[in-house]
Image (tube, rainbow, N blue to C red):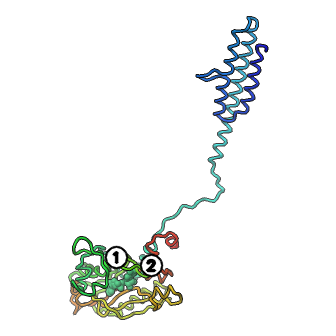
């Protein structure tokens, strides 16, 4: 083989291999193969080792050719590296590209809980009738929850509410919002000299059998009006007005005689639900009516406990279940949906 043939061969091979190298990594490998790395010799270095075995005459031509090949390959490598870089850049741009014509993914929006929305609806209706909101604690004394409401210790009516007692003696989770009657009369009545007209919304708790119409925790909206010459007709008027705004005048109300130790006389208020389906009959216990509130004229003993002279003052109170009331409005046939936090339910409101 003529001394420069090996160089020609390397040049041809290297150029062919270079045009097949299509990534930065492949180019690096190629460079190692022909120019060598720190640790290993390349094909050109190997060819150069033949120099020592050549005659004096042959050496200059070989050296010249070797330099040429080195230059050609270096230039070819630079050109190819530039091409590969452009192709790789192009690919990475198009991989991360944003197609502005594609439809977007809308972010999930938070919303208020249906029970909160409903409480606001109820509060607004009463606000229009002049009721202010009064807050009363969820952890109550036994005295406020029962005693001052005309249910002394051992009073059998205490059994009407299945109570959660706290470890600390004398404290309970309120079973109804009625203890707020005492608190609001005492605080706002100024020793029985000022009238009161407030609603008390909030959570109440009962150790109760959970069913489609009854939960263990639910909201109540207590209403209390104390003044001169307040009668049962005022209570009825307020409730009829409430129902008109809540249901748009489309629902029948029913006042039914009942019993509570803290009101006399006492009533319960129902909305008409219907009996068409098995579920309707279950929710209404077969009657077609769903109870939404207990109410009555405030008992003289309770007025006295609130600081009023029952000879001079009278008042009515009611305790409504806003979730019950909303079931009728929104066609929710199981109260348990309210606190199950199932998004399929919550997202409908
Ligand atoms: C009471 O709690 C009385 N404090 C109401 C009252 C206030 C009477 C002022 C007189 C004067 P009752 O336990 O019936 O009464 O509950 C009142 C309302 O709360 C019911 O009509 C119903 O709408 C709602 N409610 C009662 N129990 C549940 C329950 N387990 N789940 C959901 N709502 C309920």
Q: Which residue is more in the foreground, 231 or 33? A: 33
Q: Residue at x 52, y 71 (%)?
A: 344
Q: Is residue 77 above or below residue 91?
A: above
**Residues at discs 2 and 1 in contact (Cβ within 8 Å):** no
Kindly tell me whether mark 1's CB lies below 8 Å from ligand 1: no
Q: Position of residue 10 (x, y in %)?
A: 74, 22
Question: In the drawing, does residue 184 fall left or right of residue 27?
Answer: left
Where does the image place residue 119, in percent across and percent down from the top left?
Answer: 41, 76
Image-based side of 260 in relation to 125, left or right: left
Residue 335 - label = 2
Residue 277 percent across, percent down from the top left: 53, 87
For mark 2, give the secondary structure: loop
Residues under labels 2 and 1: Cα distance? Answer: 15 Å
Q: Is residue 42 left or right of residue 240?
A: right
Decide which of 256, 133 is in the foreground and name it: 256
Residue located at (48% from left, 65% from top): 110
Specify whether tag 2 is near ligand 1 (CB below 8 Å). Answer: yes
* Residue 101 position within the rendered picture, expressed as x and y whole percent measured from the top left: 66, 56
The residue positioned farthest toward the top in the image shown: 56
Question: What SS does tag 1 mark?
Answer: strand
Is there any visible trace of residue 320 in the rendered image? no
The answer to which image quadrant residue 149 occupies is bottom left
68 lies above or below 344: above
Circle 1 is placed at which residue position?
A: 205
Q: Nearer the viewer, residue 265 or 4?
A: 4
């Amino acid at each position: 083989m003529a001394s420069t043939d090996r160089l020609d061969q390397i040049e041809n091979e290297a150029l062919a291999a270079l045009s097949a190298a299509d990534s930065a990594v492949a180019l690096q490998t190629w460079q190692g193969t022909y120019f060598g790395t720190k640790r290993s010799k390349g094909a050109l270095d190997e060819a150069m080792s033949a120099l020592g075995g050549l005659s004096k005459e042959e050496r200059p031509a070989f050296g010249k050719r070797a330099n040429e090949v080195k230059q050609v390959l270096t230039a070819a490598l630079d050109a190819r590296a530039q091409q590969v870089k452009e192709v790789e850049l192009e690919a990475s741009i198009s991989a991360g590209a944003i197609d502005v014509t594609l439809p977007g993914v809308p972010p999930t929006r938070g919303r208020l809980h249906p029970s909160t929305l409903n409480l606001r609806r109820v509060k607004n209706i009463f606000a229009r009738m002049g009721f202010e909101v009064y807050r009363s604690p969820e952890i109550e004394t036994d005295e406020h929850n029962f005693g001052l409401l005309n249910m002394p210790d051992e009073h059998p009516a205490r059994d009407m509410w299945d109570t959660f007692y706290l470890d600390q003696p004398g404290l309970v989770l309120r079973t109804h919002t009625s203890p707020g009657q005492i608190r609001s009369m005492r605080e706002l009545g100024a020793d029985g000299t000022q009238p009161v007209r407030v609603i008390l919304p909030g959570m109440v708790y009962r150790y109760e059998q959970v069913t489609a119409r009854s939960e263990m925790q639910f909201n109540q909206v207590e209403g209390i009006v104390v003044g001169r010459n307040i009668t049962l007709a005022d209570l009825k008027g307020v409730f009829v007005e409430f129902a008109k705004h809540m249901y748009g005048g489309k629902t029948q109300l029913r006042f039914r005689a009942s019993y509570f130790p803290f009101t006399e006389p006492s009533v319960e208020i129902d909305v008409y639900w219907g009996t068409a389906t098995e579920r309707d009959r279950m929710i209404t216990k077969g009657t077609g009516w769903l109870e939404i509130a207990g109410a009555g004229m405030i008992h003289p003993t309770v007025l006295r406990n609130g600081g009023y002279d029952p000879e001079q003052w009278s008042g009515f109170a009611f305790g409504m279940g806003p979730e019950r009331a909303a079931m009728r409005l929104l066609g929710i046939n199981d109260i348990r949906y309210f606190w199950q936090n199932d998004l399929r339910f919550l997202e409908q409101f």
